[in-house]
Image (cartoon, rainbow, N blue to C red):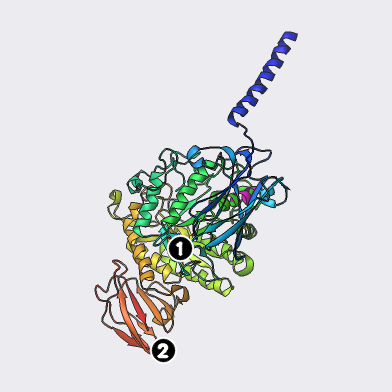
């Protein structure tokens, strides 16, 4: 018996030693860094400037302290003039080259600045340690890292064209459109809402799928041909497919795309920023560095980043659902603002908030309570040094219930991301433009998902044998607006009533959703060429507003001026009264324009939304103010859609 007990004890000791040794092999502890600071990047206005501190050694999976919650690195950046001044959250960056090395440990801590001004910038590093110090403040100063200071010099930007670094950061300025801080131009978007699983990419470290049959990982193989020499990669040449996909979108002239950054338990169950699917307090440094390569390339290619922070299936507070919050393990803090949710928001802001054109979307088809939404929006606003645009998306039938309690000073939302039937985009856009303006905080209103959910924007005719016609029957007994019975429609209907329907209401633009019953859908899409012609129509619209210098940020929907007092889809008017009027005819025709409140002569030109190009003459070349003026007929087929441009 004694011998047996000794053997058991020895085996137990051996097992413990084995675990300790295994852990030591996994985490090779290194000395702390020496508090040196490196400033890297193109040191120019609006470019990404990276401060890297050689700080305390850590590993992604450390718990005492946890490098993400208990070690707080923040950097104060101040322009020599005294303004602007940014407190930028820093983050643990492993060995500083994790995108390429897949490192999980190291001594590098980072913060990114996108400087507004040329000149000298000073920095001061704060580094503290304490339970949840990164989220709640406090903690003890960690020397010699805390208090490190220095400076660097920024030159003027040298970028031109699509590159957002030529125009500066997009900002909410209390209007219905975002404005570039550098060029002062206002922004309209058009791009891809699908696939929501864009980041479920096999070339990213630590990426797997919980639903391999329904939502396999992507290769983006159809876009390998769009990658060009000189474009970024990571590791041993990884990333070419997704980088090529962004090149394709930019080459088509669109300027936005969206993606979920967390969808555990959702439709895809294949995107998360953690070291493991359920390790919510430990972030994957190499995966997130690889995401950053993609997002930085998007900024350089003029593509707006639509961050969808969570999916409906895991926001955990479904309105009208017969269940209580807190029952979905994937939900961060059961839907509330706790440690998990704060850390999630902080990590995304720290790593990607330097991007010049983005929005934080609190949730896709979100059903959190008003208080939970308010708290999350406030935390995003207070943590993000750049005060990026914050929006919310929810189901069509629940928009009144979800959005109204957040209007005006009830929240820090700056806009909404609408999901509506494709044929009701104009009316729903108008509703939230008007209600938000009346509440004293005008929202930026985009249409980012088109119902029916099974259809959305159809593929081009002929793509994979599809005829390009979308049609779906209404389920028996359904009364939900999102499942309305759809008449057959095509990409031309989307152009008329989704794209131009939003723009002519005064909306901020569109992103196109691909329904789950169609080829290259919201879960499986890897080929953006499936909607090649639709991207052309988006480019044509964006080029029109830019080339013709339309002052859209100063214009409002004025349908009553053309007799459309019900704001139906027959014809739309968008105007800056007395100066410029746009009148869009989705199905041809003509109209009289009430110019009784304007004086002088106005030219009448016509624009072709199908082919683009220069403005052309119709049957009436000019009209006089002071009365209702007949606009005449367009220059060609009057049954097609046309845009009349009436200018003083």
Residue 246 visible, this angle:
yes
Q: Name which quarter of the figure residue 436 lies in.
A: bottom right
Q: Position of residue 520 (x, y in %)?
A: 37, 49
* Total labels drawn: 2
Q: Is residue 174 left or right of residue 147?
A: left
Label 2 SS: loop
How packed mark 2 is, by other alpha carbons closer than 10 Å (few <14, some 14-19, many 20 or more), is: some
Q: Position of residue 98 (x, y in %)?
A: 52, 41
Label 1 SS: strand
Q: Position of residue 100 (x, y in %)?
A: 48, 40
Q: Is residue 25 above or below residue 633?
A: above
341 magenta-colored: yes
Which of the two discs, 1 and 2, labels the residue nearer the N terminus?
Answer: 1
How packed mark 1 is, by other alpha carbons closer than 10 Å (few <14, some 14-19, many 20 or more), is: many
Residue furthest right as drawn: 2
CA gap between label 1 and label 2 equals 33 Å
**Badge number at residue 222:** none
- Nearest the eye: 135 or 608: 135
Q: Name which quarter of the figure residue 220 lies in.
A: top left
66 magenta-colored: no
Range shown magenta: 339-344
Residue 525 visible, this angle:
no
Instruction: Look at mark 2 in the image and give the residue it sits on.
Output: 596
Instruction: Look at mark 1 in the image and give the residue it sits on.
Output: 447
Quadrant in the picture for the C terminus:
bottom left
Q: Is residue 73 above or below residue 544?
A: above
Quadrant in the picture for the N terminus:
top right
Q: Position of residue 498 (x, y in %)?
A: 40, 65
């Amino acid at each position: 018996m004694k011998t047996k007990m000794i053997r058991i004890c020895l085996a137990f000791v051996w097992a413990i030693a084995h675990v300790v040794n295994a852990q030591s092999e996994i985490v090779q502890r290194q000395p702390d860094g020496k508090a040196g600071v490196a400033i890297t990047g193109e040191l120019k206005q609006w470019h990404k400037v990276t401060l890297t501190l050689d700080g305390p050694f850590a590993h992604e999976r450390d718990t005492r302290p946890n490098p993400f919650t208990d070690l707080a690195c923040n950097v104060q950046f101040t322009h020599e003039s005294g303004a602007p001044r940014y407190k930028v959250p820093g983050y643990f960056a492993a060995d500083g080259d994790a995108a390429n090395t897949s490192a999980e440990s190291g001594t590098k801590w980072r913060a990114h600045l996108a400087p507004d001004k040329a000149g000298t910038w000073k920095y001061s590093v704060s580094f503290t340690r304490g339970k949840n110090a990164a989220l709640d403040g406090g903690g003890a100063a960690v020397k010699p890292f805390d208090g490190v200071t220095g400076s660097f010099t920024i030159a003027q930007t040298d970028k031109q064209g699509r590159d957002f670094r030529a125009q500066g950061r997009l900002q909410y300025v209390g209007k219905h459109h975002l404005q570039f801080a550098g060029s002062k131009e206002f922004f309209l978007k058009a791009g891809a809402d699908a696939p929501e699983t864009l980041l479920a990419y096999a070339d990213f470290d630590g990426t797997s799928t919980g639903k391999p049959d329904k939502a396999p990982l992507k290769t983006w193989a159809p876009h390998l041909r769009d990658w060009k020499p000189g474009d970024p990669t990571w590791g041993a040449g990884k990333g070419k497919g997704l980088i090529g996909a962004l090149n394709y979108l930019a080459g088509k002239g669109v300027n936005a795309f969206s993606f979920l950054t967390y969808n555990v338990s959702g439709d895809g169950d294949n995107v998360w920023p953690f070291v493991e699917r359920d390790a919510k307090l430990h972030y994957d440094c190499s995966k997130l560095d690889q995401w950053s390569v993609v997002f930085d390339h998007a900024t350089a290619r003029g593509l707006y980043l639509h961050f969808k922070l969570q999916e409906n299936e895991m926001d955990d507070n479904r309105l009208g659902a017969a269940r209580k919050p807190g029952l979905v393990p994937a939900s961060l803090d059961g839907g509330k603002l706790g440690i998990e949710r704060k850390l999630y928001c902080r990590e995304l802001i720290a790593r990607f908030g330097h991007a010049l054109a983005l929005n934080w979307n609190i949730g896709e088809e979100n059903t959190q309570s008003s208080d939970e939404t308010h708290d999350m929006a406030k935390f995003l606003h207070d943590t993000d040094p750049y005060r990026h645009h914050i929006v919310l998306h929810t189901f069509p039938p629940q928009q009144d219930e979800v959005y109204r309690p957040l209007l005006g000073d009830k929240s820090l939302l700056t806009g909404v991301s609408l999901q509506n039937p494709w044929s009701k985009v104009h009316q729903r856009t108008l509703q939230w433009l008007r209600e938000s303006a009346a509440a004293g905080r005008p929202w930026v209103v985009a249409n980012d998902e088109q119902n029916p959910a099974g259809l959305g924007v159809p593929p081009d005719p002929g793509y994979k044998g599809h005829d390009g016609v979308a049609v779906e029957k209404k389920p028996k007994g359904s009364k939900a607006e999102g499942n309305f019975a759809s008449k057959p429609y095509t990409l031309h209907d989307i152009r008329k009533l989704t794209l131009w329907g939003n723009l002519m209401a005064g909306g901020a633009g569109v992103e196109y959703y691909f329904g789950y019953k169609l080829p290259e859908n919201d879960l499986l899409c890897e080929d953006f060429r499936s909607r090649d012609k639709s991207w052309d129509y988006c480019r044509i619209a964006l080029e029109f507003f830019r080339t013709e210098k339309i002052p859209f940020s100063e214009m409002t929907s004025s349908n009553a001026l053309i007799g459309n007092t019900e704001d139906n889809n027959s014809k739309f008017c968008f105007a800056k009264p007395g100066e410029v009027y746009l009148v869009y005819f989705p199905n041809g025709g003509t109209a009289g324009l009430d110019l009784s409140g304007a004086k002088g002569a106005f030219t009448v030109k016509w624009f072709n939304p199908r082919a683009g190009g220069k403005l052309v003459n119709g049957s009436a070349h000019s009209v006089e103010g002071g009365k209702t003026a007949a606009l005449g007929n367009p220059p060609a087929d009057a049954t097609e859609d046309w845009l009349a441009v009436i200018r003083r």
